[in-house]
Image (tube, rainbow, N blue to C red):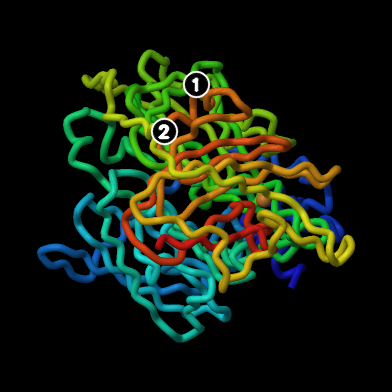
Amino acid sequence: MKSTRRELLKVGGRTILAAAIGRSGLEFGSEFEGEKGPKDLAKLKFSQPLRVPPILSPVRSDATTDYYEITQKEADVEFMPGIRTRIWGYEGMFPGPTIKTRRGRAAVVRQTNRLPGDTVVHLHGGVTEPASDGFPTDMIMPGESRSYVYPNQARGATLWYHDHAMDHTAHNLYMGLAGLYIIEDESEAGLGLPSGEYDVPLILQDRSFGQDGNFSYHAGRAGRIGARGAVMLVNGVSWPRFEVATRKYRFRILNGSNATAFEIALGNGRPLTQIATEGGLLTRPTECPSIPLAMAERTEVIVDFSGYPLGTQIVLNNVGGEGPKSEIMRFDVTREERDENTIPEKLSDWEPLDPKLAVRTREIEFGISMEFNIHPLIWTINGKKFNPNASLANVEYGQVEIWHLKNRKFGSLEKLHPVHVHLVNFQILERNGEPPKPWERGWKDTVSLGKGEEVKIIMKFDGHRGRYLMHCHNLEHEDHNMMARFDVV
Ligand SMILES: [Cu+2]
């Protein structure tokens, strides 16, 4: 098998990759190797053009609703030239096709599972009734289908849909079960933000590959630290280059990795102009030298390439990233174009939730249990493992609460926990007793809870009643019990 592959690679004239893949017993990108990828990986950089996931067309539409059908299936795709990798994808794509809808228009997505394992679909950021929210035990078994109803009444934003199956969400996502879901909002129409081909999603993911070209999925120490990889993918392409014109672009950026946080910055030192967080547009653009992006967080930025001479190359860096992952992709300025619009000073209205409206503050602690000694290691919320049949918090419909999230220290095992709350968008009141960071002052559905950190968030529980989830979005932590049910009653 190996020699056949090498032969193929030679025919393709890609001996660099043959050398990288053929290394004796060394998988590249595995955390077991301390993320030491072969130097040859560097030669892959910026050799392939960026791809943009296609927009999924509805199979039919009526006055209020668009109906979509998605088949979850295996496919072989090329992340690196000449290397075929088996994936699990929505419509067999990595990432899945983008669903683009309008605020106020409902969508029904019928998902059919043609994979060898069971799946669940969650619309991350969606205000969705419990039956369609993707509770981990509401599985779609192989060969079966399930329809998910999304009302899309909330403000326009960049959401994503991804797997949420009990105990193996992490593996399912690593294999490819993730795609973007964009809600467009009429209120954006008059702002003159870059649109069409100048409105570009960037889904950032890292992956590890084995000698056979397939993903090498390792959840890390004790099977529960988190799966990483030394190969940086953007929209399913390793370290792509993107040819841009001398004008402004809008980038919708998602950290879709299992267990890797990024911090994005332009390689030329110019700031990023942030315009949105998970829950849509900010009140006004914010200049950020860099923007940290924990797992599942989204940010939207405007980058203006006007004024750069043709031939300029600007790398999108990952500040603090190790080895090959210190760079993400490259923008190549290749053509002149005029762009008349300026970025408006005001983007949207903002109503801060008044802490005085909160009926209570809940203390919620993200920690580790050693109840079974060191192996297996259990990640907990308030000392408890996930129990789908028990609610950690019963919140009353329509009420405002403050949640005081704490990352509990536990020796060297202290880790970043990006906390995601289903159903609601929240505002960050405090990070470690200080105001939130400049890049997190918008509507959020995921907040980074770093080592030893404490964050206070405020939210109003409305939209639907029923059972929902809050959990860590390090997917291996989530699968190994750092998840809790809350009920809106
Ligand atoms: Cu975690």
Q: Dot 2: few (<14), some (14–19), or many (≥20) neighbours within 10 Å?
A: few
Q: CA distance from mark 2 to mark 1?
A: 31 Å
Return the residue nearer the eye: 434 or 206.
434
Residue with the mark numbered 1: 288
For residue 201, above or below residue 269: below
Establish if 41 lies above or below 77: above
Confirm if mark 2 falls within 8 A of ligand 1.
Answer: no
Residue type at mark 2 is: Lys
Indicate the secondary structure of the residue bearing disc 1. strand
Disc nearer the start of the sequence (2/1) = 1
Name the residue at 65% across, 46% down: 417
Residue 260 vs 380, above or below: the answer is above
| Residue pictured at 53% horizontal, 25% vertical | 437
What mark, if any, has residue 356 been given in the picture? 2
Residue 91 place in picture, x, y as percent: 41, 68
Q: Secondary structure at mark 2?
A: helix
Residue 251 place in picture, x, y as percent:
40, 35
Q: In screen coordinates, is 336 left or right of 18?
A: left
448 or 33, which lies in front? 448
Name the amino acid, label 1. Cys
Left/right placement of residue 408 relative to residue 464 reads right
